[in-house]
Image (cartoon, rainbow, N blue to C red):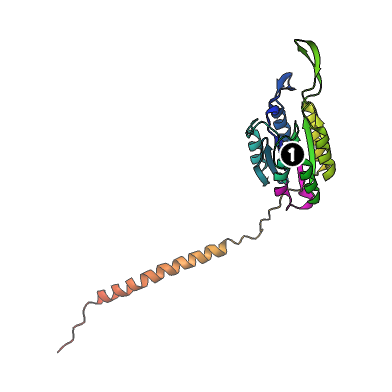
Amino acid sequence: MMAIDLSGSMAEQDFAVGGRPTTRLNVVKAAADAFIESRKGDRVGLVLFSDRAYLQAPLTFDRQAVRNLLDQAQVGLTGQQTAIGDAIAVSLKRLKDRPAEGRVLVLLTDGANNTGEMDPIRAAELAKKLGIRIYTIGVGGGPMAVDTPMGRQIVNPSSDLDEGALRKIAELTGGQYFRATDVDGLAQVYRSIDKLEPVGADPVHVRPEVALYFWPAGLALLLAALSVLIATVPALIANRRLSKGPVHKEA
C-alpha cells in the first residue's frame, strides 16, 4: 500500500527538473509512478491524505489503474493539513488480512502530523502487532541560500518535516526511514525499497490444453434438433389426416 501526502506544502517548488523549479508533488508522482510500474506481480493500493485520509485505490494487480489515479491527485484535495496517523490507520485496514510477506506500507510526507483522529506512533504500534512493515519517506529541499530584503540568508524549506516521528514509525515496524531532498534522491529511495521488498511473481492463469468446447456445443445442437422435432411432429400428423379427406361409409 502506498500513502501519499497531498497537504498544501506539497505545492512547494523546491525541487527542480531540467533546471526548472517544480512542485514536490510533481516529483513524487513521477518517482512513485516508476515504482508502481516496476512492481509487476504485486497487488498495489493507494491512500491519499491531507486533512483526512481516504482509500483512492484498493489493493489490485491493475497497476495501470493505480498509476492513473495517482496522476489525477491534486494538492489540497481534502485540505491543507497532514493526517499521518489516519493515513496509516486506513492502510492497515487493507493490509491486515494480506499474507505476511505482502503487508507493506510506503508512506511519503513533507510535514508533521497536525490533524486527524489517530496518533502516528499509536498507529505504528498497531501496525507492529499486525506484522505490517512501514517504510517512511520525508521529502523536501534541504537548507539553501536565498536573497531576502535582509540580505542573503540560509533557509530550510523542510523545517516542518518531523523526521523523528517518521524514523520512529519505521523502526517500530521493522521498516526504514528515507530522506529525499532532490529528484535523484527520491528515485533512489524507491529503488532501495524495491530491493528491500522483492517483487512477487505474476498470478498464473492455467488454460487447459484439451479442447472441451465441443461437448456443450454438441449437447446444445442435440437439444435444438429435439425441439424442432417435437414442434413439427404434431403438424405432420395433422397434415396427414387432412390429406386423406373425410371417410364415407356405404349404407
Q: Does residue 138 appear to the left or right of 25 in the view shown? A: right
Please identify the quarter of the rendering in which residue 143 is found. Answer: top right
207 vs 138, nearest the viewer: 138
185 vs 153, nearest the viewer: 153
Q: Any magenta on residue 75?
A: no
Q: Position of residue 142 (x, y in %)?
A: 81, 24
Q: Does residue 36 appear to the left or right of 221 in the view shown? A: right
Q: Position of residue 224 (x, y in %)?
A: 45, 65
**Which residue is rendered at x = 56% and y = 65% of the image?**
215
**Which residue is rendered at x = 80% and y = 51% of the image?**
129
Residue range highlighted in magenta: 92-105
Could one spot residue 134 in this view of the protein? yes
Could one spot residue 190 in this view of the protein? no
Q: Does residue 69 appear to the left or right of 230 in the view shown? A: right
Quarter of the image where the C terminus is located: bottom left
Q: Position of residue 42 (x, y in %)?
A: 73, 46
Please identify the quarter of the rendering in which residue 134 is found. Answer: top right
Q: Where is mark 1, residue-wise? A: 38
Task: Check disc 1 and report its element: helix, strand or loop.
Answer: helix
139 vs 28, nearest the viewer: 139
In the rendered image, the vertical position of residue 190 relative to residue 129, given as above or below: above
